[in-house]
Image (cartoon, helix red, strand yellow):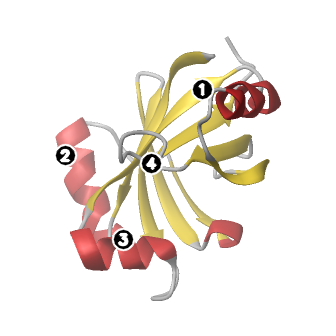
Amino acid sequence: MIKKFNHIAIAVSDIEKSIPIYEVITGKKVKEILTVKEQGVKVAIFDIKGVLLELIQPLDLENPIAKFINSRGNAIHHIAYSVNDIEKTIKEYSELGYRMIGDKPRIGAEGKPIIFMHPKSSDGILMEFVEDKEE
């Protein structure tokens, strides 16, 4: 099922303020900054030896990420894992009784199919699965 960690996403209220902090902490420059309108976020990506660190900032105040930040402040939002086949992953976890958010994958910030597992199914932690066919 899971091949490796894909990324850790940290919700931030001000991505421009956060980027320099994470550049110092990680010793890496931000790899790229994207706007993912479908998910309502701006994303800054750091590559740390093949595991990505994503800073995610909501594009508007009604966004679920904005609501997350309002209740928790800047914090880890989710952990993502790479999988070979997203459809197979959805099927396998669903058959085991785990609930996904949505019933079909969508395209994530990396341009790859993704799906989230509902935190009520995963001990309170939001988990994302990313189809990553690269070895």
- Callout count: 4
Q: CA distance from mark 1 to mark 2?
A: 27 Å
Distance of mark 4 from mark 1, alpha carbons? Answer: 15 Å
Mark 4 vs 2, N-terminal side: 2
**Residue 126 image label:** 4
User: In the picture, which quadrant includes the N terminus?
Assistant: top right
Report if residue 58 is visible in the image.
no
Circles 4 and 3 in contact, beta carbons < 8 Å: no
Kindly indicate whether the residue at mark 2 contacts the one at mark 4 (C-beta within 8 angstroms).
no
The residue beneath circle 3 is: 68
Instruction: Tell me which label, 1 or 3, sits earlier in the chain.
Output: 3
Q: How would you rate the neighbour count of disc 4 (Cα within 10 Å): few for under 14, some for 14-19, many for 20 or more?
A: some
Mark-to-mark CA distance, 3 and 2: 25 Å
List the residue tagged with mark 2.
24
At 50% from the left edge and 87% from the top edge, which residue is drawn? Answer: 62
Q: Which residue is mark 1?
A: 82
Label 1 crowding class (10 Å Cα cut-off): few <14, some 14-19, many 20+?
A: many
Residue at 27% across / 63% down in the picture?
18
